[in-house]
Image (tube, rainbow, N blue to C red):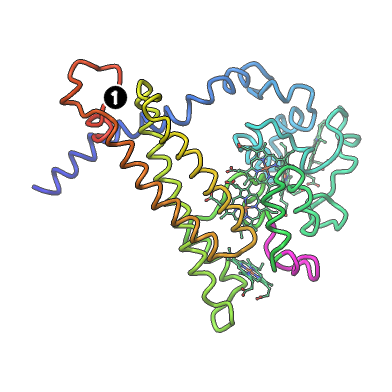
Amino acid sequence: MRSSRQAALVALAMPLIMVLIIMLTRLPDVDAQRARQAGPGGLSAKFRGNNCVTCHATISEPLALSAHFYQWRGSRHEAAGIGCDKCHGGDPQAKQAAAAHRGVAPPAQPTGSLHRQNQSATCGACHREVTEAFVQSEHYRQLRNSAEGPVCATCHGHMASAVIYWPPETAKLCASCHRSGTDSAGLPARAQDLISAFTRADEILEWGGFLIESNPGRRAQLRAEIDDLTRLKTTLSEAKREFHRFNLEASRTSADRVFTDGYRLKEAIWKKIPSRRSHQGNRSEPTRDQTERQ
Ligand code: HEC
Ligand code: HEC
Ligand code: HEC
Ligand code: HEC
Ligand code: HEC
């Protein structure tokens, strides 16, 4: 009985969740999609005249090269208009491959922009605060001295726009160097917990944001909560930057504080949203009961 009710609830909730996911992933992207449709090969108009992008869009062999193009395609960097040349160097104006590739070096070449020892500077040109934290870490010292230790792409992957590790994978990554039986044996488990703490804090803020967005008519009344949400997002972002110093305790303390404060904030917003009973007639504004069912 109970499990069939649960199954029914899941069946009921799934389409709503799917619609929500589609809305969340599509809405802000309408302009980008239109722009893409305008360009060659569905590329954003932002890259018209960037020959790295337009030529690589036409290459399907060798597989590894093509795969790198598609990793970039759809990444945060593509969305932000960051072409290949911004990380790899070279001349995006040149039409011939040989001329364009002048200055593009394989990552293994010590003078190349993506070599382990130069990567922080290349990414740091745009991600200043994260990189400032990273270069103060023990990892960076190791990197300078022995070219050992994780670099930006170790955790962010090729094209570097997401964190590619979920918590247990993070622990595995750390454990690949911080092995059991050494001083730093406890690090992987602590890192795993920290990533979970980031995720939990992310989720609670997203929830708060969702409640605010689904009640557009209440924005004036929710002004204080909207400000608090912005502040908490900034704190979480700072904690994530701090992570790059690998001061796990400090990041964990901040992430947990964001979660606790975020939870309270979500409750406060919840209280200000009318329940359906008191707002029978108003259908245009999703009510507490409707959001509750989602
Ligand atoms: C006219 C087409 C064309 C243009 C323009 C072009 N490429 Fe390429 N690129 C290729 C081809 C073909 C290959 C594979 C064969 C080779 O290495 O030349 C390649 C290979 C690469 C590789 C892999 C190198 C390797 O040895 O595996 C990188 C990285 C790269 N290109 C980056 C760039 C960047 C950055 C730009 C712009 C500054 C650019 N490309 C412009 C066609 C192009
Ligand atoms: C945000 C920075 C960034 C952008 C933008 C970017 N790449 Fe990369 N790319 C990287 C990093 C980092 C690596 C991995 C280096 C390593 O292995 O340490 C990489 C690796 C590669 C490789 C394999 C290594 C090599 O040189 O053979 C290819 C090929 C490549 N990228 C092609 C491209 C192409 C084509 C574009 C544009 C469509 C592009 N990249 C855009 C950062 C970037
Ligand atoms: C030319 C500037 C530029 C360079 C170089 C660059 N990035 Fe970015 N990066 C951006 C922009 C702009 C965004 C999009 C920010 C946003 O969506 O809020 C971004 C997004 C990201 C994100 C996602 C951030 C988030 O908020 O989730 C990561 C991670 C990232 N970059 C890592 C890297 C790494 C690693 C490198 C070097 C291999 C690199 N970037 C090189 C400009 C750059
Ligand atoms: C040991 C793994 C690791 C390394 C090395 C690493 N990062 Fe990160 N990075 C993370 C994690 C974990 C987060 C937080 C992810 C999350 O939950 O959103 C993050 C977040 C980010 C963000 C988003 C920050 C924000 O405000 O939300 C950027 C940008 C970024 N990293 C860039 C870099 C750059 C540039 C480098 C190299 C100088 C680098 N990272 C090295 C793991 C790493
Ligand atoms: C590619 C190897 C490598 C990876 C992967 C790696 N580290 Fe390290 N790490 C080192 C080296 C080398 C040192 C310096 C020697 C030492 O203290 O063990 C170090 C030092 C540290 C230190 C400072 C020393 C200490 O014991 O307090 C912290 C903290 C740290 N790492 C955390 C992490 C975390 C968290 C991860 C996973 C997200 C990670 N590391 C992944 C190589 C690595």
Q: Which of these two is toward me, 148 or 126?
A: 126
The answer to whether residue 93 is left or right of residue 235 is right
Percent x, y of residue 147: 78, 66
Label 1 element class: loop
In the picture as drawn, the residue positioned furthest to the left comes out as: 1
Ligand 3, by image quadrant, is top right
Q: Which of these two is toward me, 84 or 86?
A: 86
The answer to whether residue 86 is left or right of residue 37 is right
Q: Residues within 10 Å of mark 1 (few under 14, many from 20)?
A: some
The answer to whether residue 230 is left or right of residue 242 is left
The region drawn magenta spans 140-151
Percent x, y of residue 102: 90, 40
Mark 1: which amino acid? Pro
Tell me: residue 93, above or below residue 90.
above
Say if the magenta span includes residue 149.
yes
Q: Which residue lies at the image location 69% right of the left edge and 20% below the top edge?
A: 45
Residue to which mark 1 is pinned: 286
Percent x, y of residue 270: 29, 36
Tell me: residue 193, above or below residue 280.
below
The answer to whether residue 286 is left or right of residue 55 is left
What is the quadrant of residue 74 in the picture?
top right
Q: Which residue lies at the image location 32% right of the left edge and 39% below the top edge?
A: 268
Q: Which of these two is toward me, 230 or 247?
A: 230
Say if the magenta span includes residue 33.
no
